[in-house]
Image: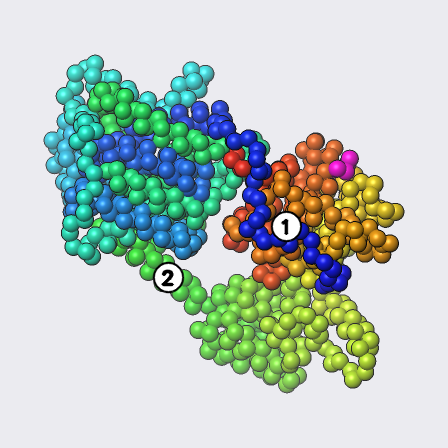
Amino acid sequence: MTLCPPARTTTTDRPRAQRPHGPPGGPPRRFRIAGADFSASIAVFLIALPLSLGIALATGAPLQAGLVAAAVGGIVAGRLGGSPLQVSGPAAGLTVVTAELIQRYGWRTTCAITVLAGLAQLGLAALRVARSALAVSPAIVHGMLAGIGVTIALAQLHIVLGGTPQSSAVDNALGLPAQLADASAAALVVSGLTIALLLLWPRLPGRTGRILRTVPAALAAVAAATAVAALAGLGVPRVDLPSWSSHALPGLPEGPVLGIAAGVLTITLVTSVQSLLSAVAVDKLAAKRAGATGTAAPRSRLDRELAGQGAANMVSGALGGLPVAGVAVRSVANVSAGAVSRNSSILHGLWIVLAALLLVPVLDLIPLPALAALVMVVGVQMVSITHIRTVTRHREVLVYAVTVAGVVFVGILEGVALGIAVAVAVAMHRLARTRITREERDGRQVVRIRGQLTFLAVPRLSRALHQIPPGADAVVELDGSFMDHAAFETLHDWQSSHVAHGGTVETTGPGGGRIAEPAPAGRAAAEPGAGAGARGAAARSGAHALGGQPCCRPWTPWRNHQCDERPPAGGTGGTTGQRLASGIGAFQRNTAPLVRDELARLAREGQRPSQLFLTCADSRLVTSMITSSGPGDLFTVRNVGNLVPLPGEESGDDSVAAAIEYAVEVLRVESITVCGHSGCGAMQALLNSDPADLAAPPSPLRRWLRHGLPSLERMASRRHAWARIAGRLPADAVEQLCLTNVVQQLEHLRAYEPVARRLADGTLTLHGMYFHVGEAQAYLLAGTDEVHSYDDVFNHVPPGAASEIRPGAASAASGAQSLEPARAS
């Protein structure tokens, strides 16, 4: 849509490379640490210190390697990673892998393998495949972690009893009776005290217990066991940290190439999947905390997080440390302690460095059975009852059990491969399992189809349909979430033939609701309880096949398409009027019966929209489609350029101001959304026009476009950097102005007195939105609770990453805002 002929080019069309990315000439930023980050770093450090030593003990690596990995994970991964609140370090999930590599190739080669694994992670991050790791079934991931936990617990149980673990979980299980018969009393006292405190410490009652619980349970348990062992003079082995001058560094890999490659692949796989899943979990915890406290944190950028983990593994391996991954225990403690930025993780790494240099005499007092008991409890906790209930509820127990057994009895890579194979087999079984029955009910022939309707079920479907007598009244009940093309064609062809022979066919969904066609994909019914928008969508799809004209197919474009009428040979006006009448007729016939009850309710109760949606008048912007909304959901205002004039500047036309006042004061909407879009003709006109031309004897269009001049000035201003979208600069100046205009119009909204008052009361939120028409991708602007003077960053998140819209927070470093893709709830 071109609103204004091109005029002369303005200074806003200069190359993007010349645009500033921050306020020039300003004072240098000061490195500031929030008090919440400082206190959280202390809490995480107190948990990480004993865990790092315990994990190093469990792998058979030098104990200092655990401290090196903890420090590098905190500093390097904390600084470079994409999950600000995640804490990285040596993880219990890597214990089995690292122990096997050390036993097979030695410590120096294991360090080299860690470096190579980090390099592989950097390569994967460059390929932007981080989101692909989340495609693995949760049952497989939970099964892998549970299998690792079982292996860890069996190995550490031998140290708890005063013995030495064997090389495999099977050998450890078989050797357990002999170890129980030869248990060490001193080791049992120390480890028993450690386990008791780990389990009871979080449950200490009363006010005193609440104060004591501020000390992490891991630190309290290890400290108490150390004190008892020292005071009682128990003869148990203790930590022995050698001099840093003799610390072993990596050497050239020695061993079979295939074996070393398998080790690199295993460490890469386990560290990457664990870190990414932990980052997603941290996002969920941070979102819950934001809902409770209003303290939001930026969402994780998974590809950057993968790169940060890769850099940390390279540094850790080069310095003689264990492999590094995101650790759920420390990350949860970090979020719970109130951390607000990555400074907490970095500080915790610095405290580890200071402890490793200054507290060696204190660390040498820790009994090894206490560390073994600590790691054993962590291993047992990795077999989560919650996860078992979840996979049971989703009927994936078989996948979980096979993965656990594979990891315990064969190995991690082999166990994961077995889990994937079983998951694929289960999915194929479910896809192919379709029940088709035929019965006579109330004089009608009823064909019930349960399950996914694919080409595998076409022979049975065709047999059941052709058993229905010609001319009979038939009902086809579809109860499934998928129908492929072969099944659709079979059902469509049979219905056409049956109707031609004098019969009738009614297609219903699982709730008995009538639908006009079996959709080839997705749920083919307007189910009871579905929203009006969903029911309308079902009706719209129903207008294009079963019962319609033969020209229609499910993939028929909706643009100016009508099934029931052929355009006459007359003029254009007659054709347009006929299309309008035909479309209305299709609504009355197909959609109205489905939405009539909903509209009747709205007519009785009046409109109660949840938000004011202010967007452009562009014909390609279908608000109900991109927001999956129906009647009564949105109070929509559309104008050229989605502009919000400043109060008092509408030049005699107060339509936008009146709509804002009515929505905020009378309808009491909970949010206001300003939605821009790609290829906006108003923004093109602004770029191609001189401001002086807009001030000339104005036409109505020029008078209106003057309200967009502040957006043009904002983009040209050196106080504001160019907005970014999905980590890149906009494709051209038009897209840049479209993005900038969204942010500028939100500023204009805040100038309205009713909006400002509701914002101050906390009863109204503002959202910015950008819809890329060509990509069918919607972005949501978070952090709109305040105006920032630096970057507006539009971060791309794949569909399904978030189930609800929450205002985000500005980045502590740059004051950046983020824009994330919307997803229909």
Q: Main secondary structure of the magenta part?
A: helix
Q: Amino acid at mark 2?
A: Val
Question: Which residue appears farthest toward the top when viewing the image?
Answer: 231
Q: Nearer the viewer, residue 735 or 561?
A: 735
Residue at 83% over, 41% down? 648
User: Image check: 517 left or right of 701?
Assistant: left
**Where does residue 712 sit, x and y in percent of width and height?**
70, 48
Mark 2, residue position:
424
Query: Do labels 2 and 1 touch, CB within 8 Å?
Result: no
Asked if residue 75 is among those painted magenta in the image, a careful observer would answer no
Q: Work out which quarter of the rendered image holds the N terminus and state it.
A: bottom right
Q: CA distance from mark 2 to mark 1?
A: 43 Å
User: Image check: 631 left or right of 96?
Assistant: right
Does the rendering let one see residue 588?
yes
Find the magenta span and give its range: 751-755
- Using the image, tell me which numbered label, if any, was put on residue 503: none
Q: How is the image coloured?
A: rainbow
Mark 1, residue position:
739
- Determine whether 25 is above or below 457 in the image: above
User: Image check: 592 left or right of 453?
Assistant: right
**Which element carries disc 2, helix, strand or loop?**
helix
Residue at 63% over, 60% down? 773
Q: Earlier in the sequence, mark 2 or mark 1?
A: 2
Q: Nearer the viewer, residue 269 or 400?
A: 269
Residue at 42% over, 63% down? 430
**Which element carries disc 1, helix, strand or loop?**
helix
Which quarter of the figure has residue 74? top left
Q: Residues within 10 Å of mark 2 (few under 14, many from 20)?
A: some
Q: Amino acid at mark 1?
A: Leu
- Determine whether 768 is above or below 771 in the image: above
